[in-house]
Image (spheres, rainbow, N blue to C red):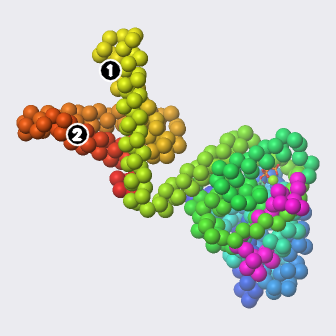
Amino acid sequence: MQRSDGSVVGIGYGGDGGDGGDRKDIVLSILIPTYNESENIPQLLRSIRDGLHSLLKQLDAKAEIIIVDDDSPDGTADVAEGYSTSIRDEGRLSVKVLRRYGKRGLLSAVLDGLKTAQGSNVVVMDADLSHPPALIPVMLDELMHDRCDLVIASRYVDGGSVENWSMKRKALSISANMIARMILNLDVKDAVSGFFACKRWILEGIEFTTSGYKILLEVLVKVDNIRVKEIPYTFVNRCHGKSKFSTKIAIEYLRAVWLLYRYGRKRRRGERRGSVLFLSRAARFYTVGATGLLVNYGSASLASMLTNMHIATLVGILCSITSNFILNKLWTFEDTDLAVIYTLKQYSYYMGLSSVGGALQFLLTYLLNHIYGMQYNLALLIAIGLASTWNFLSNKKWTFKERIWG
Ligand SMILES: Nc1nc2c(ncn2[C@@H]2O[C@H](COP(=O)(O)OP(=O)(O)OP(=O)(O)O)[C@@H](O)[C@H]2O)c(=O)[nH]1
Ligand SMILES: [Mg+2]
């Protein structure tokens, strides 16, 4: 019995229980999230057993199948438990069934499965027979011979294909894959495959942050320096049960790509040396400041043709602050989070801090010139220098939420 944030309510063991105490190592854990897959389970379990039989025998090793079911109304978990004894394959194969409350999604199902996994390698696959179990021994063989750390069953390498897909489904899958490969700069052909195998430590080392319908994407983005191999397969449309694909999942997918893009950018930024980053930010900030002067002058001149001098000056100031803000957000600080409320909040911070900078300049010029008797031009230059330094550092820290240094 295990409770994982309350979600896992029970584990049923089949086969020899996977902890039978004999000497064979568990070399593989097959993680299968299920929701209403009762019609597919029997054939799936049999095919996995038949596919793995020779390799496990040859290796004198064991494998476990971990079904993570979200309380499927069609009784998937019961069916899986019922079949578990018949697929034991002389104790080489065991079935664990994790039962969770409610439909909690594919990623969390895989992660809950991973917590109980004992194999040194893992396979992640669907239960709907779209992913041919016959490929599992091929994948395991690659990992066991240490030819790579991650094996992707790929529809888009030579020899791979999809069967009986409508044009719409093909277009959706190809676009999803293209978006991910381009935006996330991934060097694999099928970055959104739901069927892959890897060393267990790879999955254990990742802090998953997307809602993750496509687990592989997050693995490819977050793990460095692993050897990846793609092997072709033919994706077969499910014969039984309903697809869980929906518009909500498509939106979640785009959100996941966006989050992973930001993750990669932040990490690359963290890898740049602090001094280089600071200087490049400062150079951009002051360049933007210079363009602001032009915007200020140009918009005030235009406005002065339509209204009085005071309003025209105000228009010039507002236009330059706004254009400076936009350029600094997008270019200087490379902040691509364009959420409306967040951006408006940043804009008000930017206005506030820049106003403090303006007041500082005014006060310093007055102090240096009137009180200390410094020549006006020199006093102005010093005041501008200090006020613009304030503007840069304060906006860096509070508006764009970066450390002052780096
Ligand atoms: N435990 C759990 N499993 C899920 C959930 N949603 C989907 N699954 C399982 O995850 C796998 C993938 O879901 P599918 O419905 O096959 O999604 P798909 O592969 O994108 O679409 P089709 O292959 O066309 O059906 C299947 O084995 C599902 O039963 C969920 O919320 N919880
Ligand atoms: Mg599927």
Is tag 1's residue or tag 2's residue first in the polypeptide sequence? Answer: 1
Q: Quadrant of the C terminus?
A: bottom left
- Quarter of image, res 229: bottom right
Q: Is residue 142 left or right of residue 186?
A: right
Residue under the point 85% across and 80% down: 55
Q: Quadrant of the N terminus?
A: bottom right
Looking at the picture, tell me which residue is in the foreground, 395 or 41.
Answer: 395
The label on residue 313 is 1
Looking at the picture, tell me which residue is in the foreground, 230 or 9.
Answer: 230
Q: How many marks?
A: 2
Looking at the picture, how far across and down is residue 405, in whole percent?
Answer: 35, 56
Q: Amino acid at mark 2?
A: Leu
Q: Amino acid at mark 1?
A: Thr
Q: Is residue 116 left or right of residue 358?
A: right
Looking at the picture, how far across and down is residue 291, in whole percent?
Answer: 41, 34
Looking at the picture, tell me which residue is in the foreground, 356 or 236.
Answer: 356
Magenta stretch: residue 153 in it? Answer: yes
- Quarter of image, res 277: bottom left
Looking at the picture, how far across and down is residue 222, in whole percent?
Answer: 60, 62
| Alpha carbon distance from label 1 to label 2 | 21 Å
Is 147 rendered above or below residue 205?
below
Residue under the point 84% across and 40% down: 168
Residue under the point 22% across and 39% down: 381
Looking at the picture, tell me which residue is in the foreground, 85 or 334.
Answer: 334
Magenta stretch: residue 143 in it? Answer: yes
Graded by Cα atoms within 10 Å as few (under 14), some (14 to 19) or many (20 or more), the crowding at tag 1 reads some
Magenta-drawn segment: 140-162
* Element at label 2: helix
The label on residue 381 is 2
